[in-house]
Image: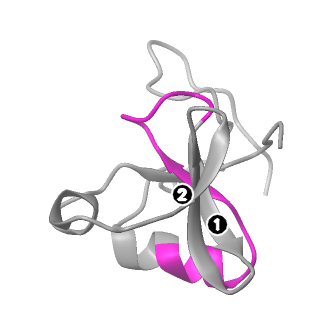
Amino acid sequence: MDIQPIEGDLMTPIPRKQGKAITMSFPNAMKEVIKGNKVTRLSWSNEDYCFLKGEWLTIYTKGAFHTWLVSEGDMVDAQDWVLMTKANN
């Protein structure tokens, strides 16, 4: 399937396949983390992301790695999770 450019204002610079959602729910984001991917939220800074590190759910924020204590706000009605396409760390 070809990747199609989207015209107009975008919430994220991530290219997407036509008809496929860019964002996902918390449970789907955690499925991606389990696969070894890094995920972030549209509301987080461009440098923050989470992933599995040494079998712990970890967040990279403010220039350091931390064990991530997930909050209700991260899980409930959160549909703004996206895959990281590239992380600096």
Is residue 35 found inside the magenta-colored segment of the image? yes
Q: The residue tagged with tag 2: helix, strand or loop? A: loop
Q: Quadrant of the N terminus?
A: bottom right
Above or below, comparing residue 61 to residue 38 in the picture: above
Above or below, comparing residue 3 to residue 70 in the picture: above
Pinpoint residue 71: horizontal percent, then vertical percent: 24, 64
Specify the segment rendered in magenta.
30-47
Gap in Å between the C-alphas at discs 2 and 1? 23 Å
- The residue lying toward the viewer, choosing from 77 and 69, is 69
Pinpoint residue 47: horizontal percent, then vertical percent: 63, 32
- Disc 1 marks a residue whose amino acid type is Phe
Number of the front mark, 2 or 1: 1
Q: Which mark is residue 51?
A: 1
The residue that disc 2 covers is: 20
Q: For residue 79, what is the image quadrant? A: bottom left
Pinpoint residue 30: horizontal percent, then vertical percent: 50, 77
Q: Residues within 10 Å of mark 2 (few under 14, many from 20)?
A: few
Is residue 62 found inside the magenta-colored segment of the image? no
Image colouring: one colour
- Disc 2 marks a residue whose amino acid type is Lys
Above or below, comparing residue 73 to residue 87 in the picture: below
Tell me the residue at 35%/66% (across/down): 25
